[in-house]
Image (cartoon, grey):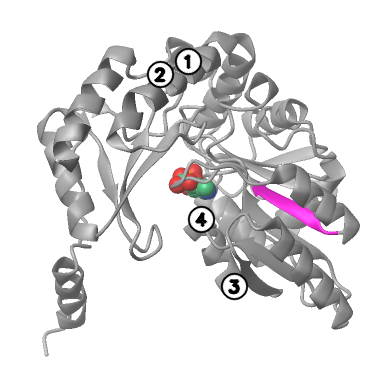
C-alpha cells in the first residue's frame, strides 16, 4: 500500500460526506470574518507597529519568554491588559488555541474536576486531552446541570478545585452563557470560572471589556483572543497572579515555544487603547446588529442579540450549497459543518462586522432569501 494511502482514504471519506475542506481565497463582502470592529485595517494599528519598528523593536522575539524572548512590549501589554480586564495579572500567548490548550493541560490538577459546556471550542478539547484533572461535558448553557454535577462530585468525595469552562458568547450560535447564575453556582461550590471571551471581547461589556468583567477577579480566568474584535492576533489570559506564575513555570506550550513577535504585542496594546478611545465603533456595530436582525427575520434567521447569526440548515450538503450560492452573488458567507458544530446542525454562520454597512446587509437578506428558496 502506498505510504500515504490512509490519508487519501480519509480525505475521500470526508468528500463523500460533503465535509472535505479547501482553503478558499477571501472574496466578496465580509460576512465571515471575526474582525467585528474593523480594526484589522485601522491606521492606528499600522502606525503603532511602524512606531515600534522605528524605535528598534525587533520583528522576531528570538526565543522563549523564559529565555531571551521576553521583551518590554510583552510585559507592557500584559500590564495594560490586566488593568483593562480588571484582573490581577495577564499572560500573552501567540494564539487563543494555544492559550486554551495550555491552560487546561496545565492548571487544573489531579483530583480537580473540569466541567465544560458541551459546545466548548476545539482548543479546550485539545487541552482536555492532556489534562490531569477529570473532565465532563455539561449540556449547553444548562446552569442547573453544572450545579447538579458539582454537588454530586462533592457528595462523592471530590475535594479538589472544580473548574467551570464556558464561553461568554458562543462562537457558532451567538448565544450567551447564563453568567450570573454560573457565577453564583461557582461561588457556592468554591469553583473557578474559566470564561472564553473570544467573541465578546471588544464587542460587549463596558469599554469592550467582555461580559465577565463584573465577576470578582479572584473567581475567574478569562481568555481574550486578540485576532477577532481586536484585529491583530494572539490571546491574553487574564487571571490571578498565581495562575500566571504557574503557567510561566509549568505551561509547556508557553515555556517551550518562541514568544510572539514584540511588534504584535505593541499592536495588541494599541488595539486595547482603541477599544477604550473609540466607543462609537461598538455603538455602530450594535446598530448594525439591530438592523440585521430585522432585515434577516423574513428569511427565518432568529435574533441572537449578538454579531453572530447562525442559519441552521441541518444537512451538510445543503449548508455548503447555500453558502456557494451566496458566494457567487458576491457575499463571503461560509458553511460550517461537523465536527465544528454538532452533527445535523450544519449552518451558515453570518458574522456582522464594520467591514459592511446596512445596505450590504439588506442586499445579503435578499440573496439569502433566494439561496434558501
Ligand atoms: C471560542 C474560541 N476560543 C478560542 C479560539 C482560538 O483563538 P485563536 O483564533 O486566537 O487561536 C477561537 C477561534 O476560533 C474561538 O472561537
Asked if residue 253 lies left or right of residue 47, the reply is right
Q: Residue at x 41, y 27 (%)?
A: 293
Which label sits in the foreground, 2 or 3? Answer: 2
Q: Would residue 22 be visible to someone looking at this image?
A: no
Q: Residues within 10 Å of mark 4 (few under 14, many from 20)?
A: many
Q: Earlier in the sequence, mark 2 or mark 3?
A: 3
Q: Residue at the spot x=45%, y=34% of the render?
A: 303
Q: Using residue 282 as the reference point, say whether residue 297 is left or right of it.
A: left
Disc 4 residue lies near ligand 1 with CB under 8 A: yes
Question: The magenta stretch spans which residues?
Answer: 191-195
Quadrant position of residue 308: top left
Q: Are marks 3 and 1 in contact (CB under 8 Å)?
A: no
Q: Is residue 193 magenta?
A: yes
Majority SS type along the magenta span? strand
Q: Is residue 307 visible?
A: yes
Vertical position of residue 121 compared to residue 33: above or below: below
Q: Earlier in the sequence, mark 1 or mark 4?
A: 4
Quadrant of the frame with the N terminus:
bottom left
Disc marking residue 121? 4
Mark number, residue 130: 3
* Label at residue 287: 1
- In space, the residues marked 2 and 1 are separated at their CA atoms by 6 Å
Q: Which mark is residue 291?
A: 2
Asked whether disc 2 touches disc 1, contact meaning CB atoms under 8 Å apart, the reply is yes
Which residue lies most toward the front here?
A: 298
Q: Measured from the top left, where is residue 27 in percent x and y?
A: 18, 30
Viewer-side residue, 2 vs 119: 119
Amino acid at each position: 500500500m502506498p505510504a500515504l494511502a490512509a490519508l487519501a482514504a480519509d480525505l475521500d471519506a470526508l468528500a463523500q460526506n460533503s465535509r472535505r475542506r479547501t482553503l478558499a481565497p477571501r472574496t466578496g463582502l465580509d460576512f465571515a470574518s471575526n474582525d467585528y470592529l474593523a480594526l484589522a485595517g485601522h491606521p492606528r494599528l499600522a502606525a503603532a507597529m511602524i512606531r515600534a519598528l522605528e524605535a528598534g523593536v525587533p520583528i522576531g522575539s528570538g526565543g522563549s519568554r523564559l529565555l531571551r524572548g521576553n521583551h518590554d512590549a510583552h510585559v507592557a501589554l500584559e500590564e495594560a491588559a490586566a488593568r483593562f480586564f480588571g484582573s490581577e495579572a495577564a499572560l500573552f500567548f501567540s494564539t487563543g488555541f494555544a492559550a486554551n490548550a495550555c491552560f487546561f493541560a496545565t492548571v487544573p490538577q489531579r483530583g480537580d474536576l473540569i466541567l465544560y459546556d458541551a459546545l466548548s471550542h476545539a482548543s479546550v478539547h485539545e487541552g482536555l486531552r492532556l489534562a490531569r484533572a477529570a473532565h465532563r461535558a455539561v449540556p449547553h448553557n444548562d446552569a442547573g446541570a453544572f450545579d447538579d454535577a458539582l454537588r454530586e462530585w462533592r457528595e462523592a468525595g471530590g475535594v479538589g478545585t472544580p473548574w467551570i469552562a464556558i464561553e461568554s458568547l458562543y462562537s457558532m450560535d451567538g448565544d450567551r452563557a447564563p453568567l450570573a447564575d454560573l457565577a453564583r453556582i461557582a461561588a457556592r461550590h468554591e469553583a473557578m470560572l474559566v470564561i472564553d471571551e473570544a467573541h465578546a471581547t471588544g464587542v460587549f461589556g463596558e469599554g469592550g471589556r467582555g461580559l465577565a468583567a463584573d465577576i470578582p477577579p479572584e473567581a475567574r480566568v478569562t481568555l481574550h483572543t486578540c485576532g477577532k474584535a481586536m484585529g491583530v492576533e494572539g490571546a491574553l489570559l487574564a487571571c490571578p497572579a498565581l495562575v500566571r506564575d504557574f503557567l510561566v513555570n509549568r505551561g509547556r506550550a508557553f515555556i517551550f515555544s518562541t514568544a510572539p513577535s514584540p511588534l504584535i504585542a505593541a499592536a495588541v496594546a494599541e488595539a486595547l487603547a482603541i477599544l477604550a478611545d473609540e466607543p462609537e465603533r461598538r455603538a455602530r456595530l450594535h446598530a448594525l446588529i439591530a438592523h440585521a436582525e430585522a432585515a434577516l427575520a423574513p428569511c427565518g434567521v432568529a435574533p441572537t442579540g449578538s454579531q453572530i447569526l447562525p442559519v441552521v440548515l441541518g444537512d451538510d450538503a445543503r449548508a455548503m450549497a447555500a453558502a456557494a450560492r451566496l458566494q457567487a452573488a458576491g457575499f463571503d458567507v461560509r458553511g460550517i459543518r461537523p465536527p465544528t458544530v454538532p452533527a445535523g446542525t450544519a449552518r451558515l454562520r453570518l458574522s456582522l462586522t464594520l467591514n459592511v454597512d446596512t445596505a450590504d446587509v439588506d442586499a445579503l437578506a435578499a440573496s439569502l432569501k433566494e439561496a434558501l428558496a
